[in-house]
């Protein structure tokens, strides 16, 4: 079977005017990840990313250490993250306290995000969001199909936490609540490894950060 390495982007700029760019810490996470791939002889014959800036910057940081990556990178919009800003904007007055958490500390934000995702999955935001939960799940499934039909033996896919969580939720035939719980766990620059062929898609390992295991790198274990 072929292999898929799902990499979540490095730490972005949560709380800034532009979340969609890597922080200095995020760039370093990705350089160390590439070094980990190099040490372990991991080579890729296909590279795909979403369209977001943080995806492109993650791939650029990896490519610094793995220049032998395929020059051509396929850009799949299906690998883009859901719009969490739009989800918070879609909240009604009864959930105003969750919307206010966006401007709060990161811990408050992630706690609120879990609740907002649950509302989204239950269809309670459908009339006010640009993409429903069902539509998001469908495009993630389309991304998985595009990878499965590509014919490569080892694929590197740079994407976001919500997409990775949805892919694994679907692979495990798990409920929405499980997908949301997975989403909350996925760390920046982590690797989720899967085996696949045209008919099957199987989880091998989830949310690995071996490149950040050194005690001196624990401060680089981030979620945002």
Image (spheres, rainbow, N blue to C red):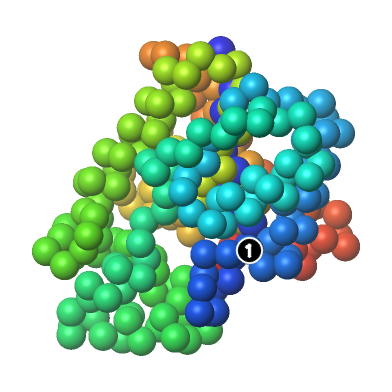
Comparing 135 with 64, the one in front is 64
* Left or right of residue 131, residue 32 in this image: right
From the viewer's perspective, tell me whether residue 160 is left or right of residue 25.
Answer: left
- The residue at the far front in this view is 71
Element at label 1: loop
Whether residue 184 is visible here, answered yes or no, is: yes
Callout 1 crowding tier (Cα within 10 Å): few <14, some 14–19, many ≥20? many
Please state the total of marks drawn on the protein image.
1
In terms of image quadrants, where is residue 222?
bottom right
Which residue does the image show at 59% across and 25% down from the upper left? 46
Q: Where does residue 220 sit, x and y in percent of width and height?
A: 74, 63
Left or right: 101 as drawn, with respect to 159? left
Residue 85 spot, x, y in % from top left: 36, 70
Residue 92 at what x, y percent from top left? 18, 79
Instruction: Give the residue displayed 64% in from the left and 51% down from the top.
Output: 58
Please tell me whether residue 129 is drawn above or below residue 69 in the rendered image.
below
Quadrant where the N terminus is found in the figure:
top right
Residue under the image location 78 percent in, 63 percent down: 218
Residue under numbered circle 1: 22
Report x, y in % for residue 65.
Answer: 81, 42
Where 99 sits versus 171, above or below? below
């Amino acid at each position: 079977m072929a292999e898929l390495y799902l990499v979540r982007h490095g730490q972005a700029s949560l709380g800034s005017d532009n979340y969609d760019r890597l922080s200095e810490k995020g760039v370093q996470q990705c350089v160390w990840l590439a070094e980990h791939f190099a040490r372990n002889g991991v080579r890729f014959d296909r590279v795909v990313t979403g369209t977001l800036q943080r995806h492109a910057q993650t791939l650029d940081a990896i490519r610094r250490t793995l220049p032998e990556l395929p020059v051509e990178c396929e850009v799949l919009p299906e690998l883009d993250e859901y719009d969490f800003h739009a989800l918070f904007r879609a909240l009604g007055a009864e959930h105003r306290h969750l919307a206010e958490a966006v401007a709060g500390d990161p811990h408050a934000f992630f706690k609120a995000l879990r609740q907002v995702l649950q509302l989204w999955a239950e269809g309670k935001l459908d009339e006010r969001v640009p993409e429903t939960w069902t539509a998001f799940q469908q495009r993630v499934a389309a991304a998985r199909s595009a990878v499965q039909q590509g014919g490569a033996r080892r694929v590197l896919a740079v994407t976001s936490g919500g997409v990775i969580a949805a892919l694994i939720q679907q692979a495990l035939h798990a409920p929405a609540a499980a997908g949301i719980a997975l989403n909350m766990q996925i760390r920046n620059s982590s690797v989720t490894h899967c085996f696949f062929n045209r008919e099957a898609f199987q989880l091998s390992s989830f949310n690995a950060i071996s490149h950040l295991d050194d005690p001196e790198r624990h401060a680089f274990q981030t979620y945002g």
